[in-house]
Image: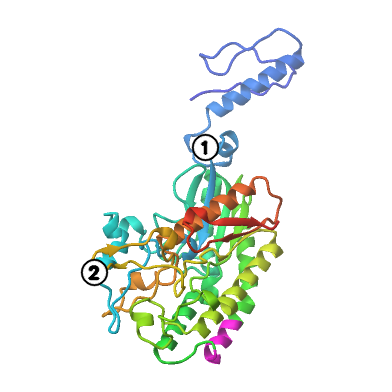
């Protein structure tokens, strides 16, 4: 056992050193100088004999060692990477539906990249390899989980420790500089409501005039702002006293369905089965407008208010997928050419959202949860957006506000960002 010098109570340095092999303490000069030198030597000795566990994230080690910078993304499927398996969408067979295998394979990264599905998605939470937090510097961690609502941030979910607990650990072991939060959509049941509207089309009904659909949706939107605000404050509380003081960036939701003048063409007859069978768009135009300008826009407004109320930074993703949404006029799908060859559009001309395919059998659960989420190209667009926005945070004042916007004919790396504050 190493022995350190006993405290000096006389104002002079002790006559002997601590470790038997250590250098003798200086004796020249005044007692005050000797005392200062003694205290320095005693401190170094004390550090030398700290137990090994002090290097594993204890306050002593955290204070003594520089921690690497890190970025964390957390929340739900719109940041976990749900949908990243697919590079665009395959045109289906008309009349009776079904997706030709050759077209499906041409859009499936399991086939095009030759990787197993387990390499694309983590089990349970469906964190994708192509999600916005790819490898790089600073260190980046994706702890988001598909299906998570605001309450799930503080609970164990899908057999994992709560996201807030994971965040606290990361903030203790790293210098977390930015936390990006995507939450609120599952509280409003955004994707579920879109699926209800798809079922309404299949049964010759509008969802946007059905008060059994719109009434609860409006009520959920009314209360979501307070839930998002509480989630932001919970994130702040989770990193308190960890040594990290991150900026919290709250993102709103990209809208997956085109509406208004951007939606459909004459060839996509609203009541024809080809609208679903061939193009994966089982929605009436009237319902598309309500989803985008009613439900989706209202949700995003409440999220922005929550960010402002809590002093968080905010990025509006409502226009991120413009020109590349399902049911849109401009984007193309992978299809057969006249000579029977498979033609896949480039990302600049493709759909960036997983559509609603009409299949002969029910979709597997994992594929069903991908519907109406940004696909591989959409994930690239989101990554481009957040890279630009996070880069601005270093010089922006608190409460920064930004908007990301895509456009027809533009590739994911051409997504533009406007900073309004």
- CA neighbours of label 2 inside 10 A, class few (<14), some (14 to 19), many (20+): few
Magenta stretch encompasses residue 213: yes
Residue at 56% across, 34% down: 65
Question: Label 1, label 2: how many angstroms apart (C-alpha)?
Answer: 57 Å
Q: Nearer the viewer, residue 131 or 225?
A: 131
Q: Nearer the viewer, residue 16 or 50?
A: 50
- Res. 38 image quadrant: top right
Residue 167 shows in the view: no
Residue at 55% across, 80% down: 289
Magenta stretch encompasses residue 46: no
Q: Secondary structure at mark 1?
A: helix
Residue 329 shows in the view: yes
- The residue that disc 2 covers is 101
- The residue that disc 1 covers is 54
Q: Secondary structure at mark 2?
A: helix
Q: Nearer the viewer, residue 135 or 333?
A: 333
Q: Which residues lie in the magenta part?
A: 209-218
- Res. 106 image quadrant: bottom left
The answer to whether residue 128 is above or below residue 365 is above
The answer to whether residue 14 is above or below residue 94 is above
The answer to whether residue 201 is above or below residue 131 is below
- Res. 219 image quadrant: bottom right
What colour scheme governs how the chains and residues are painted in the rendered image of this protein? rainbow
- Is 418 on the left or on the right of 162, as rendered? right
Residue at 36% across, 73% down: 368
Residue 312 spot, x, y in % from top left: 66, 58
Per the rendering, the mark at residue 265 is none
Residue 204 spot, x, y in % from top left: 42, 92
- CA neighbours of label 1 inside 10 A, class few (<14), some (14 to 19), many (20+): few
């Amino acid at each position: 056992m190493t022995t350190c010098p006993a405290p000096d109570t006389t104002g002079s340095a002790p006559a002997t050193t601590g470790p038997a092999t250590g250098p003798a303490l200086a004796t020249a000069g005044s007692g005050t100088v000797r005392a200062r030198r003694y205290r320095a030597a005693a401190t170094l000795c004390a550090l030398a004999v700290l137990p090994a566990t002090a290097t594993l994230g204890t306050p002593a080690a955290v204070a003594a060692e520089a921690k690497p910078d890190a970025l964390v993304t957390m929340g739900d499927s719109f940041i976990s990477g749900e949908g990243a398996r697919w590079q665009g969408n395959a045109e289906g067979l008309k009349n009776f539906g079904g997706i030709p295998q050759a077209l499906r394979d041409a859009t499936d990264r399991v086939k095009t990249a030759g990787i197993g599905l387990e390499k694309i998605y983590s089990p349970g939470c469906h964190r994708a390899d192509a999600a916005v937090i790819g490898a790089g510097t600073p260190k980046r961690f994706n702890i988001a989980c598909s299906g998570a609502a605001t309450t799930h941030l503080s609970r164990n979910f899908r057999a994992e420790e709560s996201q807030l607990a994971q965040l606290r650990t990361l903030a203790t072991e790293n210098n977390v500089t930015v936390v990006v939060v995507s939450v609120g959509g599952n509280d409003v049941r955004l994707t579920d409501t879109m699926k209800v509207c798809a079922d309404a089309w299949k049964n010759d009904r509008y969802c946007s005039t059905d008060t059994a659909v719109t009434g609860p949706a409006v009520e959920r939107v009314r209360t979501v702002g307070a839930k998002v605000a509480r989630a932001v404050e919970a994130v702040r509380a989770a990193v308190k006293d960890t040594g990290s003081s991150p900026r919290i960036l709250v993102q709103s939701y990209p809208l997956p369905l085109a509406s208004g003048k951007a939606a459909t063409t004459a060839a996509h007859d609203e009541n024809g089965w080809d609208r679903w069978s061939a193009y994966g768009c089982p929605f009436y135009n009237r319902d598309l407008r309500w989803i985008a300008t009613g439900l989706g826009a209202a949700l995003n407004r409440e999220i922005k208010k929550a960010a402002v109320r809590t002093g968080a930074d905010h990025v509006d993703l409502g226009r991120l997928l413009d020109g590349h949404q399902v049911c849109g006029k401009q984007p193309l799908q992978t299809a057969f050419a006249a000579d029977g060859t498979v033609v896949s559009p480039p990302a600049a001309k493709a759909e960036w959202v997983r559509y609603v395919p009409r299949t002969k059998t029910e979709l597997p659960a994992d594929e069903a949860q991908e519907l109406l989420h940004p696909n591989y190209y959409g994930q690239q667009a989101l990554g481009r957006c957040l890279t630009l926005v996070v880069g601005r945070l270093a010089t922006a004042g608190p409460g920064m506000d930004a908007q990301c916007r895509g456009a027809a004919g533009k590739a994911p790396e051409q997504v533009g960002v406007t900073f309004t504050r």
